[in-house]
Image: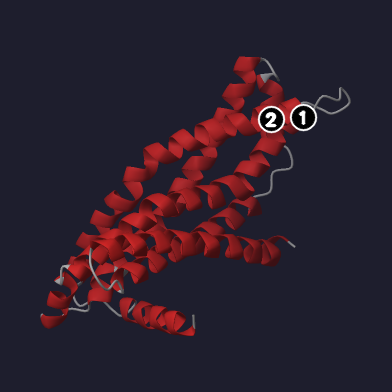
Amino acid sequence: MIKEIGQYLLIIFQAFKKPDKGRVFRKQLLIDFQALGVSSIGLVAFISLFTGGIIALQTAYNIDNPLVPMWLIGYTTKQMMILEFSPTIISLILVGKVGSSIASEIGTMRVTQQIDALEVMGINPANYLILPKITAAMIYNPILIVFSMGVGLFGGWFAVVITGQVTSVAFVDGLQSFWDPFSITYALIKTVVFAFILASVAGYKGFTVQGGSVEVGKASTQAVVISSVLIIIFDLLLTQMLLT
């Protein structure tokens, strides 16, 4: 474990050196925006829409006491989507989609000796391959999370209104009740940290692959597992530091 952590820190240190050519970095960054962010919008929207509806309906189902105000359904849906589901669960889903893609892409370049060719040409391969992906994830993931929050809340509103569980006015009153702007700040802080973990761990596992296609697959799986575990651990730590 100590060896793995040391190798990870060394590679990340190399990745965060100043790019040799800013124009090349910006071009690769735009490519990674498309590959890691834009291509995930549909998946994020679909999952957030239905999950928002599920949260709202389950909350309505469990509130069967006539003394409990119906606006509490909207409030609960808002808190669950903003504080936990969108920043954490969507990040875990992106680990499976984006993290495995990063590890597979860089790992394939390693086993086909493309990274060795970059080193021979005097190019810093960690900086060229990993830094744009980390930057793209840390910039675009918060956009996806805010989008997920909005879609999830709409899904919750649509589900309870279409099923008649609660009126539109009561649900919207719940969304507006006890509004705390720091909730969004907290969610975005978590998202940025999770994005760094996602991209850096996947980049490291792909960069250090040794062997052939089988090892690339194993590295991709390891990247997803390690990133998911770290995200859960840091979710607990950040919640302790920021909310308590």
The quadrant where residue 23 appears: bottom left
**Protein image colouring:** secondary structure
| In contact (CB < 8 Å): disc 1 and disc 2 | yes
User: Which residue is label 2 attached to?
Assistant: 58
> Which x, y percent locates residue 205?
36, 69
Residue 178 seen anywhere in this rendered image of the structure: yes
For label 1, count other residues whose C-alpha is less than 10 Å away and answer few (under 14), some (14-19) or many (20+): few
In the rendered image, the quadrant that contains the C terminus is: bottom right
Question: 103 or 183, which is in the foreground?
Answer: 103
Name the element at disc 2.
Answer: helix
Q: Residue at x 68, y 48 (%)?
A: 180
The quadrant where residue 213 appears: bottom left
The quadrant where residue 201 appears: bottom left
> Which x, y percent locates residue 28?
22, 61
Amino acid, disc 1? Asn
Specify whether 211 is left or right of 85.
Answer: left
Q: Residue at x 71, y 36 (%)?
A: 75
> Which x, y percent locates residue 142?
46, 53
Measure how far apart labels 1 and 2 are at the Cα level.
6 Å
Q: Is residue 53 above or below residue 147?
A: above
User: Which residue is label 1 attached to?
Assistant: 62
> Which x, y percent locates residue 56?
65, 30
Q: Residue at x 59, y 29 (%)?
A: 53
Name the element at disc 1.
Answer: helix
Q: Residue at x 67, y 43 (%)?
A: 79
Residue 138 seen anywhere in this rendered image of the structure: no
Q: Is residue 7 above or below residue 87?
A: below
Amino acid, disc 2? Gln
Residue at the far right: name it.
Answer: 67
Q: Is residue 118 above or below residue 97?
A: below
